[in-house]
Each structure stands twice: as structure tokens, then as C-alpha cells.
Amino acid sequence: MTPTPQIDCVVPADAQLGESPVWDGERGVLWWVDINGRAIHQYDPVAGEDRSTDVPRKPAALAVRSGGGLVVATDQGFHGFSPEDGSFDSLAPDPEPDLPSNRLNDSRCDRQGRFWAGSMHDPTSAKIAEGRLHRLDPDLSVTTFLEGLGVSNGLAFSPDGRTMYHADTWAETVWAYDYDPDEGVPRNRRVFAEFFDVAGRPDGATVDESGCYWVALVRGGQLARVNPRGELDRLIPFPVTVPTMPAFGGALLDTMFVTCLGAGAVSGADARPGIDGGLFAFDPGCCGLPEPTFAG
């Protein structure tokens, strides 16, 4: 039996809605966002320091840009962020101008430098399934692939880049697609994992070097690992009930960082004062993969 790891709150940030941890190997820092707090965080695990920058839009997810800075999926399309001067400029307009109550949500770059981002109705309490899945290409054009999603989440790619994973939190399901790296098109959708009989629903995810899919089970207080065959082979209890997304980081990519919802999203027995909204870290016993960068 694999022992339960010690999970530490490394940044008691009290974020309203922590999401999208992404390791930046060049800088040696972890980027993450507070969506509702409209802030982009930069955590240096060696120095133990976390810095945040306020931005004018809701930063739902991000990726490092190969030419410098970050690409950020927001409630008003795609933006570029410069850590050096804090500038925050539009890269591509809102891909859903017909759905003003939607915002972009979970995202992931493929290994060819395309930036995938799904959307959701904001707030989720409205229970309106109008989410979509988009691809932002390096030339900053946007293509839409899926519609009718509840909460688009769980984007990740297999180590060889030929399988794409995508979840709908409401549907409690993760799907796998055959992915053509040259065309950047997902095909042949099939069920990869379902979580109807497990506490929590699939939120953000990542893949380790052996191809296992790690996913946060929001409101279930745990992380799940699913092997490449689609078998749930590990559940890790989490210190808070609302983890949102895991990411591998550190110099050897052997540390797992996890974001979570803040105190405003939990109450009563589910509340964890002092650590809700924080950034967590632990040793998962395996290593991740270098995070692809956006080529635009």
C-alpha cells in the first residue's frame, strides 16, 4: 500500500478561487491564479516567497509563452501578461461574445505550442450548460471544437502527445481523444474515467511521466490518480475539501503543487480556517513532465 503523503500549505494565501498552477522551468517558479481575486501569483519554492500582481480581468488559467511572459485565459478572451512590468494586454478577443455570462476556465498547451481553453457559465450555481472548448493557435486565431459543456476542466495530454484528456465537472466524467499533433485536432472521444461513486467531481488535472492522470476532486477533499488504462488506482486525502488543480514542479518535477478554493466557497464543517485558499505541496512519489509553452 502506498503511504499517504504529508501535504503542507506552503502559501496561506487565502485566495478566493485558486487555480491553474503551472511550473516555469526557466524561472524556477510556479505560476498560479486567483480567479475571483483577479490576481496572478508567482511562487518561488527555493526562497519560499509568493508574489502577486493584480490584473483587470478574471485570470482563469495561464501558460508560459515561448517568447516571454504568459498567455492568460480570462472572462474576456485571451490576454498577454508581462511579469517584468505588469502589463496585461489583449491577444485575442472573447471567443464567446454571444455568451456574456461565460468565462474561460481550465487550459493546457499541447506540445506544438497551441493553447487549449474551455469555458463555463459564471457563476456555476446557475447550472447552465453553455461551456465550449477552444484552441488558440500561435497566429492568435481561435477555433471552437465543443459546445454544451457544464464546466470545462481536466485538460491534459499523454506523454507522447497523442492522447488528449478533457473533463466536464458537472458530468463527473473524463474523456480521452486521439490527438493528431500535426493538425491539433481531437478525434474518437471515449470515456476514460467516471467519478459517480467517488466523493468529489473532476476539476483540474495533470499527467505524470508514466502517463497517469492526476485530477483534483473538488468538494471531495481528495486527489485521484487514474492509470493509462482508465483504472482509478490511488486516492489521496487532502487537507481541504475543495482542491482545484494539481501540477508538477520543482527542479526535478518531483513536487506536486495543488491550488484550492477559498473560505468564501466553503462553510461549516467543510471550512479549514487559515489554509482554505492556500497553495499546497507534497511528494507524490513520481515525476511530471516539462510544461509546454505557448508558441504565440
Image (tube, rainbow, N blue to C red):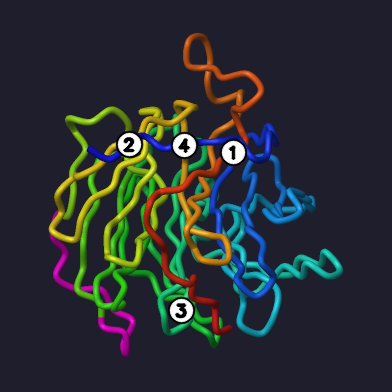
Point out the frontmost of discs 1 and 2. Answer: 2
* Furthest-bottom residue in this view: 182
Residue 114: mark in rendering: 3
Q: In this rendered view, identify the residue nearer to me: 24 or 281.
A: 281
The amino acid type found where label 3 is placed reads Arg
> How many angstroms separate mark 1 from mark 4 (CA)?
10 Å
> Mark 4 vs mark 3: which is more N-terminal?
3
The region drawn magenta spans 180-191
Q: Residue at x 58, y 66 (%)?
A: 251
Residue type pointed to by label 1:
Leu
Q: Residue at x 62, y 45 (%)?
A: 35
Q: Which mark is residue 243?
A: 4
Q: Nearer the viewer, mark 2 or mark 3?
A: 2
Q: Secondary structure at mark 2?
A: loop
Q: Residues within 10 Å of mark 4 (few under 14, many from 20)?
A: many
237 up-or-down from 86: above or below:
above
The dot on residue 3 is: 2
> For the residues marked 1 and 3, what is the alpha-carbon distance in whole angstroms?
25 Å
Residue assigned mark 1: 17
Q: Nearer the viewer, residue 89 or 177?
A: 177
What SS does tag 1 mark?
Answer: loop
Amino acid carrying label 4: it is Pro
- Whether residue 183 is in magenta: the answer is yes
Q: Nearer the viewer, mark 1 or mark 4?
A: 4
